[in-house]
Amino acid sequence: MAFDIATKRIYEPAAKTDGQRVLVDRVWPRGVSKDEAALTLWLKDIAPSTELRKWFDHKPERWDEFRKRYGKELAGKGNAFGELTDLLEHGRVTLLYGARDEKHNNAVALAGYLRERG
């Protein structure tokens, strides 16, 4: 089964085409109200560990290694995956993130991980 997964910065306006909106950052994004976020779910537990996030520091040259390390962390997050896969079985899920880099962030890594296993 192929999952319908999108990624989007939480600072962009919510849209009907987003489907279920899931924030996958450990820290709430600055300047975004709960109403603006229009979240279905905030999955803090699926975010990278603080240690990994700080090591990665959104440096593109660390992207491949970040994805490997994050994948290892994700393998141990069964409960969070259960919630996420339940949503994915009902249609599109947009993974929301706060990072400025739209290509190298945990939501993109998570989406890739889910697609590989979905």
Image: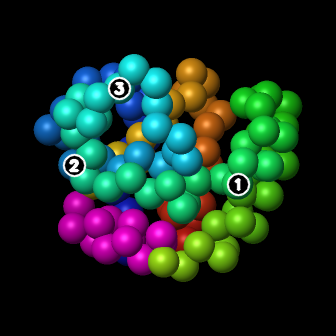
Q: Which image quadrant is residue 37 in? A: top left
Q: Earlier in the sequence, mark 3 or mark 1?
A: 3
Q: Quick check: marks 3 and 1 in contact, CB under 8 Å?
A: no
Q: In this view, does 45 lie above or below 75?
A: above
Q: Which residue is drawn at 60% across and 45% down?
A: 106
Colouring: rainbow
Q: In this view, does 53 lie above or below 46?
A: above
Mark in the foreground, 1 or 2? 1
- Left or right of 1? Residue 27 is right
Q: Using the numbered discs, state the Cα–Cα distance from disc 1 to disc 2 in whole angstroms.
A: 27 Å
User: Which SS class for mark 3?
Assistant: loop
Which residue position holds label 1?
49
Q: Using the numbered discs, state the Cα–Cα distance from disc 3 to disc 1 in whole angstroms.
A: 22 Å
- Left or right of 19? Residue 97 is right
Label drawn at residue 19: 2
> Magenta residues: mostly which secondary structure?
helix
Q: Does the magenta stretch include residue 3?
A: no
